[in-house]
C-alpha cells in the first residue's frame, strides 16, 4: 500500500506560487497544477485544482462556475493550501498507481480522466 506524493507544482497565474503574496488573503482564486506520482517513483501525472477563498466566490460571482473539485481556504496561505492537498493525498492510499490515480481523480482534475473513464 502506498500514498502518492507531490513531485512538483506550478501555477500559470502566479509563478512561483509558493512565494506569491496576494493583495488580499481573503480574495484569492487561481488554478493550481500538481505533478503527483508514486513515492520513490520518477514519473508524475498532472492534476489540476482551483484554489479559492469564500470572499472570492462572492465578490467575483464564482459560485456557478467553480468545479466540484476545488480547495477552499480562509484566509489564504500557501501553507493552508498544502495542508489541504496533503490531507487529500492521505485519502488516496492504494496498492498501485492505477488505484491511487483513480482515487486522486476524485479530489483533483486528472489529465487522463477521460481516458480512464472509458477504460472501465
Image (tube, grey):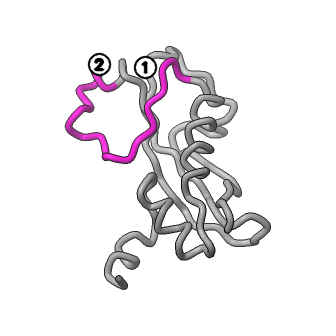
Q: Quadrant of residue 66?
A: top left
Residue occupying the far right of the picture: 40
Q: Dividing the image into 4 quarters, which one contains the N terminus?
A: bottom right
Examine the rendered structure and indicate whether residue 20 appears above or below residue 13.
above
The residue tagged 1 is 27
Looking at the picture, how far across and down is residue 74, in whole percent? Answer: 48, 20
Query: Is 70 colored magenta in this rendering?
Result: yes
Vertical relation: 38 (above or below) 9: below
Which disc, if any, is residue 59?
2
**10 Å crowding of disc 1: few (<14), some (14-19), many (20+):** some
- Contact between labelled residues 1 and 2, with CB atoms less than 8 Å apart: yes
Secondary structure beneath dot 1 equals loop
Mark 2: few/some/many CA within 10 Å (<14, 14-19, 20+): few
Q: Secondary structure at mark 2?
A: helix
Q: Which residues are magenta?
A: 57-76
Residue 86 in the image: x percent, y percent?
62, 44
Relative to 11, 114 lies left or right = left
Residue pictured at 46% horizontal, 43% vertical: 31
Distance, label 2 to label 1, CA atoms, is 8 Å
Question: Can you name the residue that lies furthest to the left here?
Answer: 64
Amino acid at each position: 500500500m502506498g500514498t502518492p506524493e507531490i513531485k512538483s507544482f506550478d501555477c500559470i497565474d502566479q509563478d512561483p506560487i509558493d512565494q506569491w503574496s496576494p493583495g488580499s488573503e481573503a480574495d484569492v482564486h487561481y488554478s493550481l497544477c500538481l505533478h503527483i506520482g508514486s513515492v520513490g517513483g520518477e514519473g508524475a501525472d498532472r492534476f489540476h485544482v482551483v484554489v479559492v477563498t469564500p470572499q472570492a466566490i462572492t465578490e467575483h460571482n464564482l459560485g456557478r462556475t467553480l468545479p466540484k473539485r476545488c480547495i477552499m481556504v480562509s484566509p489564504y496561505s500557501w501553507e493552508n493550501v498544502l495542508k489541504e492537498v496533503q490531507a487529500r493525498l492521505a485519502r488516496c492510499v492504494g496498492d498501485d498507481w492505477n488505484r491511487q490515480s483513480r482515487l486522486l481523480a476524485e479530489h483533483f482534475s486528472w489529465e487522463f480522466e477521460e481516458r480512464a473513464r472509458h477504460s472501465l
